[in-house]
Amino acid sequence: MAARTARGILIASLLCFLVITLLNILSAPHDAYDLPVLVTCLLLLFGLQLVHSAPNASAAPTRTKMLTLAAQGVLTYLPFVWLGVFWGAMAGFFAASLLLLLPPRAGWTLYGLTVLSLLIPATVDGRGAVDTFYMCQSTALTGLVVYGLSRLTSLVDQLHRARADLARLAVSNEQLRFARDLHDLLGYSLSAVSLKNELIRRLIPTNPHRACEEVDEVLVISRQALADVRRVATGYRQMSLRSEVTSAESVLAAAGVSVTVDVEEAIEHLTPATSTVLATVLREGVTNLLRHSKASYCWISAHVEEDVARLTITNDGLVLGHHPPAQHSGSGLGNLERRLEDVGGRLLVRRVPDDGDTGEFRLIAEAPVREAKAPNPDATDIADEERPYDRTDSAA
């Protein structure tokens, strides 16, 4: 509606100037045969001005702009032969078109020359100083009004299209958020449920009491997964790094992985954003360990050094060599990298081969303790072999 209103105001203004010139033509002395020619010139000028005042007129090819400007220039100055000063208002249209289509320096220079060109018909017609000044001033004003209304219409149109683009971008971002949160939240829970069920199946014949305890844990994880799905619809929930460490210990132990935990008390004082993103890194790291490695041990460390909180997850059993990602393998490390960048942190990986076909994998996440800030490559003592995560890397 706003774009149509702006366009309507522009057309109405151009029609008003057109009517004024038409009245001047009717009141000026001329031959009867000249009237159709002058009205035709007037209508052609009106059409050309509509073209030049269109929102995307300045983006037209240079040759097209030069041709239409030349045509408007001829139609602007040729009728002065018959009407003289009575045709002066049309020079304002031409001045506005110069401003709209040409670069600023050339446009304003030619705009000024167009205004001064009205001195010639005024002098030939024998007009006084006041009438001459009035003609130049009205031409300048007409040019500025038409230029301003045309630019305003173009800006309103651009704003309207920008709002539509922002709406589409917001929808796209929400879809990406939804997919990322589902991957990061449910991947861990579903892997844990699967491992627990396998453990329960082995325990039922030999240790029913322990099997019942594991069933209780499966129920807790399942309820948490259901709550996670509900929260994803409204936004990513806050998570506790301490709670995720405890949960990771339980899941890894159920998978037969020896776990060593070294967590400082200082992590209890992390901001909710930092705690949540590090907890998400821990979830994804454990999920990758269970899905993509043959780990026998895992070391989880969380420390605060100055203003940086660092989470390190190290495991063995990494299968070396490049493996193309499967069609449904997800993008866990890429999601983690973006989450850490959002809070001013960074993600690093390290792969250390052993004597066989496997090796050690280390995932390091750094995030500011208090407030988001740009990551400092010199703020860490990580070995040279460690490097920021590259999206081209295969999953851990």
Image (cartoon, rainbow, N blue to C red):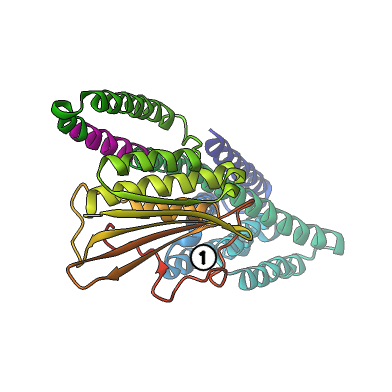
Farthest residue, direction bottom: 384
Q: Which residue is at a point 66% across and 57% down the rendered structure image?
A: 92
Magenta stretch holds residue 194: yes
**Residue furthest out toward the left:** 205
**Badge 1 element:** helix
Q: Is 20 in front, or is 329?
A: 329
Left or right: where does residue 291 sit relative to residue 227?
Answer: left
Residue 394 against residue 192 in the figure, above or below: below
Look at the image and give the residue range highlighted in magenta. Answer: 185-198
Measured as percent of width and height from the top left, residue 233 is found at 41, 29
For the stretch drawn in magenta, what is the main secondary structure?
A: helix
Residue 322 % position (x, y)? 20, 66
In the picture, the quarter occupied by the C terminus is: bottom left
- In the image shown, does 28 or 229 lie closer to the viewer? 229
Q: Amino acid at mark 1?
A: Leu
Residue 82 is one of the magenta-drawn residues: no
Give the side of residue 38 with respect to residue 228, left or right. Answer: right
Q: Is residue 386 above or below residue 157?
A: below
Q: Which residue is mark 1?
A: 69
> In terms of depth relative to the viewer, which is nearer, 309 or 173?
309
How many numbered callouts? 1
Does any portion of residue 330 appear in the rendered image?
no
- Residue 147 pos. (x, y %): 63, 55
Could one spot residue 283 in this view of the protein? yes
The residue shown at (31%, 67%) is 351
